[in-house]
Amino acid sequence: MRKKQMHNDLSPVVCLLVSLVLGSAVLAVSGYSPAAAYQAMLVNALGTRSGVLQTLLKASPLMFCGLSAALALRANVFNIGIEGQLYMGAFAGFLAGRYLDGLPPWLHIPLCVLAGALVGALYALIPAGLKRKTGAHEVVTTIMLNYVAALFTSYLSNHSFKAEGMMPQTELVRASARIGRIVSRSQLTWAVVVAVVFLAGAQFFLYHTPKGYELEAVGANAAAAEAGGISVSRLQMQAMLLSGAIAGIGGTMEVLGTHGRFIQDFASGAGYQGVSIAILGGNSPVGVGLASLLFGILQYGGAAMSRTTGVPAEFTEVIQALVVLCVSAPVLVQIQFGKGGERKGERS
C-alpha cells in the first residue's frame, strides 16, 4: 500500500517532467534553445516582484476551477461544465454587486458570493439531475451547457446589460462590492487569499469529515460504497452541486476583484484547465494549489518569454497540452480498464 501511494504521488511529477522533456524537443526542432526558453519563463514569472504578483493573478481563478473539478472527480463525476457554471455564477455575482445598493462591504460582498455560489450550483443541478434520473452522461450534458452559458452571458453583456463603448462588457459593480487589491498598482486582489482559504477548507473537509470519507469511498469503489450503505447517486449529485458552487464563486471573485464587471468570455478555457489541474494535482486541494501555480507560471512566464527570447507565445499552450496529455491519458486508461477489471472480479 505504501509503495502504491508513493507511486500515485510521484506519477504527476513524472508526467510533468516528461511533458517538459517533450516540450524541449519541440523547441529544439523549431530552432530555439530549450534552456534559454525555460530560464526566461521562470525568471519572468518568479524572479521579480511584479512577476510573482502576475503569476498569482493568473493562478487565482484556476485554483477555484481546479478545486471545483477535483471535488467532482472525488466522487467519479466528470464535471466538464465548470466554465459554464463559472459564467452563470459570475453574472449572478455581477447582478448582486450592481443592483444591491446601500449595503456595507462586509455584507454586500458575501451576498454577491452567495448569489454566485447558488446560481453555479443550480446550473450544475441540471446535468446532475439528468444523470440521476435518466442516466445521461455528465460529460455530454455539461459540455453542451457550457455553450449555453457562454452564449447566454455573451448576449446579456452585449445587449441587456452592456455598458457604453465598443467592449462587450457590463457596467461596474458598486464600490461596496469591490474586492480590494493586496498591493497598490497591481491587479492582484484579495481573491487569491479567498482561493487559498477555500483550498485549506476543502483539505480539512476531505480528510477530516465523514462526508469527505464518503467521497473517498465512492471514488475508490462505488459498488463497495453502495454495499456499505452510501447512496452513490445522491452523493454524486451533492458533489456536482458543490463543484458548481465553487465554480460560481470563482467567477464572482473575478467580477468583484480583477475586472470589477462582467466581461464577455473573460475566463475562456479556464474550466477545461481546471480539469487538467485537478488531475495533475491528484484531486487533492494542496495538489490543486501547486498545479494552479504551475499553470500561472506557464501563462504569465510564457508570455514574457515570448517578448524576451522570441519564442512564440503559443509554445506555452503546447506545454500545457503536453501536461494534459501526459497526466490525463494514464488516468483515463486506468479508469476505463480499472472499472472493467472490477466488474470482471465481481463476476468471478
Image (spheres, grey):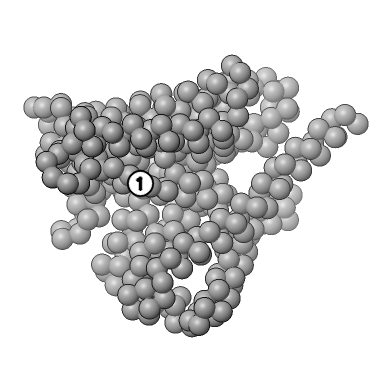
**Residue 171 in view of the camera:** yes
Residue that appears at 48% across and 56% down: 291
Please tell me which residue lies in front, 3 or 195: 195
> Which residue bears the numbered disc 1?
267
x and y percent of residue 91 in the render?
28, 33
Q: Is residue 270 above or below residue 94?
A: below
List x then y, in percent, for residue 83. Answer: 42, 40
Tell me which residue sits at (26%, 67%) in the image. Answer: 50
User: Residue 281 vs residue 294: left or right?
Assistant: right
**In percent of the image, x 50 and y 60: which residue is there?**
320
Measuring from the top left, give residue 215's x and y in whole percent. Answer: 58, 32
Q: Is residue 191 above or below residue 104?
A: below
Identify which residue, 136 or 71, lies in the foreground.
136
Q: Please name whichever residue, 317 or 101, is drawn nearer the observer in this view of the structure.
A: 317
Q: Quadrant of residue 283?
A: top right
Reply above or below: 152 against 134. Answer: below
Direction from residue 57 to residue 242 in the image, left or right: right
Q: 85 left or right of 30?
A: left
